[in-house]
């Protein structure tokens, strides 16, 4: 190969060399040995120069081959493993930064908490008042100034269950010691708990003087926030007087009449407690407890049972409720009383409540003696036997009569038993009143309780038989008993028999031992037992029947003497049980 050809193998310093290892940066050819010693040796010897060029070329090729092999190794390593020393340093940095941020936040929280502790050990929480004065976020000195300047606004209202009383100081001097009050309020702030106390105050929740839901009435009352101008004795006297006035008229006992709620139709604990008396001692103590903290209201409902004296001195609310439930068991009855088919009264809860006895307050019972008294009164209202009746006869005459054995007769003991059974069985419907004797009808006591009757007018010496419509069926003159012992008894009677002929035998004469008389009659119609009645009297002079005065000298022993024909006519048209009214 010629020199020119070999020279072409020498790479151009300005062109990149392409080798199997990739594109390489151009490298300058090292100067000839002679060139390193100055310009004088710039022309190398021909042979020597070519030799050096070949040697440099070979060295260059070797370095290029090593460089390509060296670069491929690390390049392959980086692709297969992406975490190098730089990546590890980055992860460690992130962790360190997170911890730093956490410590910063915790530090800020601690600073805020400490600031809050310091602040609320010296200032009041929001929504805090003393004697009605808002001292929110005020320190003790500022709060005292506000309170002392506005002390006249303070008042205390005690109320609950229809009781209300207001205390407002009348003294010219403030009763509130603003400085003591402010120090006590702020002193109770519990600054270590300020976050929860702050939330509670912002939500309007007040600290209560209660313990486990009840007022501790055994605690000592600390009135240190009040000044010497407060007159505790006068306060207690005034509140006590209001309590006494409220208790006026309240029996303090559990009573049936006051425990029955008419609207509800049953016994209720609310109505029962309407007789409770306020407990003077407890209410005053509670008012002073709230006054000690300068509260503005005293809610007696928070005292619960302690606000009142127990009914009968023994009953609790639970016992009252149990008693009401037991009493209500007697109220299920609802019956209408009937007398001969007519309404005669009603027995329901409103009538039964008066018969419930609370002799043992916790165990109400039926008072049977009261039921018996009621039954006797009711029976008396229906019993007409022997009672006075007033009526107007068909011919217009105004009449009145008393006595006799015709009319209604109610057995009150039987009626009481009927009602008692109805109550215990919660019976509803109707009850027919039992009677031992009945009349023809019943409207009201004092009115005639007969329909058809024989009117025997002693003043006229004339008898009339009226039917139910007031028409005369029979009438006749008669001769009644002599005045005195043999006078015909007045009253309302009834025909007891109508058997016809018999012999009338009088009482024995004590002198002779024989009957005073023995008189056979054809028609005997007794109305007072079997002793007095209508009968024929053929021994009487016929003309005597036409005089209204005849009975005075020829009167009978009490019977109604009739002419024979009149006696027969009466016998033929009457029945046993017909009412006979004898009057003058």
Image (tube, rainbow, N blue to C red):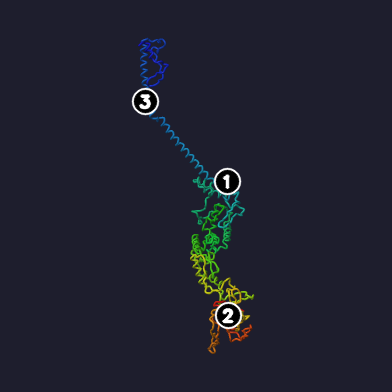
Which residue is at a point 36% across and 21% down the rendered structure image? 66
Left or right: residue 135 versus residue 19 is right
Disc 3 to disc 1, C-alpha distance: 82 Å
Q: Position of residue 253 (x, y in %)?
A: 53, 64
Is the residue marked by circle 1 packed among few (<14), some (14-19), or many (20+) residues within 10 Å?
A: some
Q: Please say if 345 is above or below 473.
A: above
Q: Is residue 279 visible?
A: no
Q: Find numbered disc 3 in the image and state the secondary structure of the residue it sits on.
A: helix
Question: Which label belongs to residue 142?
Answer: 1
Q: Which of 320 and 458 lies nearest the eye of the viewer?
A: 458
Residue 40 vs 456, above or below: the answer is above
Q: Which residue is mark 3?
A: 73
When asked about the image quadrant of residue 275, the answer is: bottom right
- Callout 1: SS: helix
Image position, residue 339 (x, y; %): 54, 70
Which residue is nearer to you in this view: 39 or 400?
Answer: 400
The image position of residue 284, as x and y in percent, is: 55, 57
At 42% from the left and 11% from the top, the residue drawn is 39
- Give the mark nearer the N terminus: 1 vs 2: 1
Q: Which is more N-terminal, label 1 or label 3?
A: 3
Query: Which marked residue is nearer to the observer: mark 3 or mark 1?
Result: 3
Please give the residue where the numbered disc 2 appears in the rendered image: 570
Question: In the image as oriented, which residue stretches furthest toward the bottom?
Answer: 512
């Amino acid at each position: 190969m010629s020199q020119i050809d070999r020279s072409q193998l020498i790479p151009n310093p300005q062109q990149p060399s392409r080798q199997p290892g990739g594109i390489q940066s151009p490298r300058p050819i090292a100067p000839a040995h002679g060139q390193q010693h100055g310009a004088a040796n710039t022309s190398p010897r021909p042979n020597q120069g070519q030799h050096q060029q070949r040697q440099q070329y070979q060295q260059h090729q070797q370095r290029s081959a090593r460089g390509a092999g060296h670069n491929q190794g690390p390049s392959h390593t980086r692709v297969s493993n992406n975490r190098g020393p730089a990546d590890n340093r980055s992860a460690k940095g992130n962790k360190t930064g997170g911890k730093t941020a956490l410590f910063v936040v915790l530090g800020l929280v601690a600073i805020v908490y400490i600031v809050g502790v310091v602040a609320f050990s010296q200032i009041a929480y929001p929504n805090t008042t003393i004697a009605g004065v808002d001292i929110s976020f005020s320190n003790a000195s500022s709060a005292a100034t506000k309170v002392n300047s506005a002390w006249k606004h303070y008042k205390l209202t005690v109320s609950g269950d229809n009781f209300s009383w207001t205390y407002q100081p009348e003294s010219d001097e403030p009763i509130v010691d603003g400085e003591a009050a402010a120090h006590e309020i702020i002193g109770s702030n519990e600054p270590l708990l300020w976050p929860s106390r702050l939330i509670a105050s912002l939500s309007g929740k007040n600290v209560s003087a209660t313990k486990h839901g009840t007022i501790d009435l055994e605690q000592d009352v600390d009135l240190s926030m009040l000044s010497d101008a407060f007159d505790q004795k006068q306060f207690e006297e005034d509140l006590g007087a209001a309590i006494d006035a409220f208790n006026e008229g309240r029996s303090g006992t559990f009573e049936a009449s006051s425990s029955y709620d008419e609207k509800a139709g049953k016994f209720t604990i609310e109505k029962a407690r309407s007789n409770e008396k306020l407990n003077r001692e407890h209410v005053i103590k509670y008012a002073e407890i709230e006054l000690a903290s300068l509260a503005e209201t005293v809610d007696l409902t928070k005292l619960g049972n302690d606000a009142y004296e127990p009914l009968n001195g023994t009953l609790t609310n639970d016992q009252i409720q149990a008693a009401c439930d037991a009493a209500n068991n007697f109220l299920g009855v609802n019956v209408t009383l009937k007398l001969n088919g007519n309404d005669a009264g009603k027995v329901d809860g409103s009538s039964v409540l008066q018969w419930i006895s609370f002799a043992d307050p916790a165990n109400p019972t039926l008072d049977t003696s009261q039921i018996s008294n009621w039954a006797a009164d009711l029976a008396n209202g229906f019993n007409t036997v022997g009672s006075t009746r007033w009526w107007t006869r068909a011919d217009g005459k105004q009449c009145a009569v008393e006595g006799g054995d015709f009319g209604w007769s109610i057995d009150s003991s039987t009626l009481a038993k009927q009602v008692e059974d109805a109550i215990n069985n919660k019976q509803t419907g109707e009850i027919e009143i039992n009677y031992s004797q009945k009349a023809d009808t019943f409207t009201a006591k004092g009115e005639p309780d007969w329909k058809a009757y024989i009117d025997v007018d002693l003043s006229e010496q004339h008898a009339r038989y009226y039917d139910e419509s007031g028409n005369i069926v029979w009438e006749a003159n008669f001769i009644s008993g002599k005045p005195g012992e043999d006078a015909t008894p007045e009253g309302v009677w009834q025909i007891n028999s109508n058997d016809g002929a018999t012999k009338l035998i009088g009482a024995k004469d004590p002198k002779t031992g024989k009957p005073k008389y023995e008189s056979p009659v054809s028609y005997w119609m007794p109305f007072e037992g079997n002793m007095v009645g209508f009968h024929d009297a053929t021994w009487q002079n016929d003309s005597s029947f036409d005089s209204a005065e005849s009975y005075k000298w020829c009167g009978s022993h009490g019977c109604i003497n009739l002419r024979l024909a009149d006696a027969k006519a009466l016998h033929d048209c009457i029945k046993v049980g017909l009412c006979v009214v004898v009057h003058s």
